[in-house]
Image: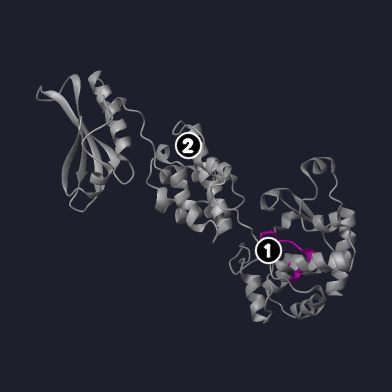
């Protein structure tokens, strides 16, 4: 059975409404709306319909915008071979290959338990939704190769490089999982594109969060201390600890050991995925101890009972204070600059105070201590400087 016929790629794109035969039972059906799809008509050997006539059946092979002419011929050939053997393709055909979008949604659902938080999980699927689904979402997984992936990456590779880089990683993940489940074979096209250097090299300038100068921090903190809002309490605590916004706002009372004067932030809420101990100074404790009377699940309770503050609350407070050119995350940089320029703190102490990983994987494997006592001394000096 030959993989050739009457139709050509140009005819497939331009034929008007109707049923157009390619030969060997394969037809291109063009609807009045212009939609194009493939069907194949086969006669199953030895089988009869209800009237006793040979069993003749039409099978859809997919839309012509997704399934190419050659792919349609290959699938039609597979169906005719089965029919010739007396097998009904409706029951014996290879399992249908999911589309990229269908499968990506399934991968997303399966990986939900692994996301650090719901926001990260939503970002993962949103990237595919915005940049991949419009181009390859309706394509069967086994028909996606380097040209199709390039269609997704090329338009944003230089203009939105970080987004494009993450998009490539997520497309690769979906196609890798598809291969593991038997829907694909061969090399992952994302790997092929990378190895071939098909996309231009992009020099990415690091983006720094806008930070306050350490010299201005004490005056700012003094102004902040005059405010009674919960967002002010949270921002003061954030400035003193050098912690990330999400870590502070998600803090629960059971994470705090008042006897040891330590806040144990669990691994599932840390960017590094590892538990982080924060030494608590007198200034830090003076902020959170009065809040125990609220008897909330969260230390910094928002407008709703037993719910944390919004992650925009501290930024909005900065705006109400007319503090321009500064972000909440930037106070981590403020602390880091002070630790280096004023306290002359060793690099590993300053970095570990910010819950940054220090050294190689091997070095970290042997470095069992988190240097809590040395970090406590540094944070005491920082609290005295900023709050004194």
Task: Tell me which corner region of the image, top left, top right, bottom left or bottom right, holds residue 2.
Answer: top left
Which residue is tagged 1? 245
Report x, y in % for residue 92: 31, 25
Please report contact status of discs 1 and 2: CB closer than 8 Å, yes or no: no
**Image point 57% across, 44% down: which residue?**
194
Determine whether 255 is above or below 223 in the image. Answer: above
The Cα–Cα distance between marks 1 and 2, rounded to whole angstroms, is 37 Å
Q: Residue 301 versus residue 3: which sits nearer the camera? A: 3
The magenta stretch spans which residues?
236-250
Q: In the rendered image, which quarter contains the C terminus? A: bottom right
| Magenta span contains residue 318 | no
Which residue is tagged 2? 178
| Pair 1/2: label in front | 2
Q: In the drawing, does residue 261 fall left or right of residue 33?
A: right
Q: If you read the primary sequence from the N terminus, does the residue marked by circle 1 or circle 2 appear first?
A: 2
Report x, y in % for residue 41: 19, 31
Q: Residue 34 versus residue 112: which sits nearer the camera? A: 34
Q: Residues within 10 Å of mark 2 (few under 14, many from 20)?
A: many
Q: Residues within 10 Å of mark 1 (few under 14, many from 20)?
A: some
**Image point 80% across, 64% down: which residue?**
336
Q: In the drawing, does residue 73 fall left or right of residue 159?
A: left
**Image point 79% across, 78% down: which residue?**
216
Q: Main secondary structure of the magenta part?
A: helix
Determine whether 16 is above or below 183 in the image. Answer: below
Q: Residue 269 versus residue 18: which sits nearer the camera? A: 18
How many dots with numbers?
Answer: 2
Can residue 28 be seen here? The reply is yes
């Amino acid at each position: 059975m030959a993989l050739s016929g009457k139709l050509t790629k140009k005819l497939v794109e331009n034929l008007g409404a109707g049923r157009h035969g390619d030969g060997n039972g394969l037809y291109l059906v063009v609807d009045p709306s212009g939609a194009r799809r493939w069907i194949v008509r086969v006669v199953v050997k030895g089988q009869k319909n209800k009237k006793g006539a040979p069993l003749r059946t039409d099978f859809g092979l997919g839309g012509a915008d997704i399934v190419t002419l050659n792919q349609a011929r290959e699938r039609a050939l597979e169906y005719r071979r089965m029919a010739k053997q007396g097998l009904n393709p409706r029951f014996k055909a290879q399992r249908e290959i999911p589309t990229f979008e269908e499968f990506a949604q399934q991968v997303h659902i399966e990986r939900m338990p692994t996301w650090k938080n719901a926001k990260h999980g939503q970002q993962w699927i949103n990237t595919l939704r915005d940049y991949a689904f419009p181009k390859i979402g309706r394509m069967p997984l086994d028909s996606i190769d380097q040209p199709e992936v390039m269609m997704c990456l090329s338009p944003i590779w230089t203009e939105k490089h970080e987004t494009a880089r993450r998009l490539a990683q997520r497309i690769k993940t979906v196609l890798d999982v598809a291969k593991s489940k038997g829907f694909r074979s061969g090399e992952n096209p994302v790997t092929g594109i990378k190895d071939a250097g098909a996309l231009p090299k992009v020099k990415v300038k690091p983006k720094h969060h806008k930070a306050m100068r350490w010299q201005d921090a004490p005056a700012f903190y003094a102004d902040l201390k005059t405010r009674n809002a919960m967002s002010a309490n949270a921002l003061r605590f954030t400035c003193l600890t050098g912690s990330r916004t999400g870590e502070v706002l998600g803090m629960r009372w059971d994470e705090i050991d008042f006897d040891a004067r330590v806040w144990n932030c669990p691994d599932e809420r840390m960017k590094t995925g590892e538990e982080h101990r924060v030494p608590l100074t007198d200034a830090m404790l003076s902020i959170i101890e009065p809040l125990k009377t609220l008897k909330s699940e969260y230390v910094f309770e928002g407008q709703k009972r037993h719910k944390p503050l919004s992650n925009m609350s501290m930024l909005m407070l900065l705006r109400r204070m007319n503090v321009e050119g500064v972000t909440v995350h930037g106070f981590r940089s403020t602390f880091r600059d002070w630790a280096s320029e004023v306290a002359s703190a060793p690099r590993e102490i300053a970095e570990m105070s910010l819950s940054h990983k220090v050294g190689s994987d091997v070095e970290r494997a042997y470095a069992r201590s988190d240097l809590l006592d040395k970090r406590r001394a540094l944070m005491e000096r920082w609290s005295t400087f900023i709050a004194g």
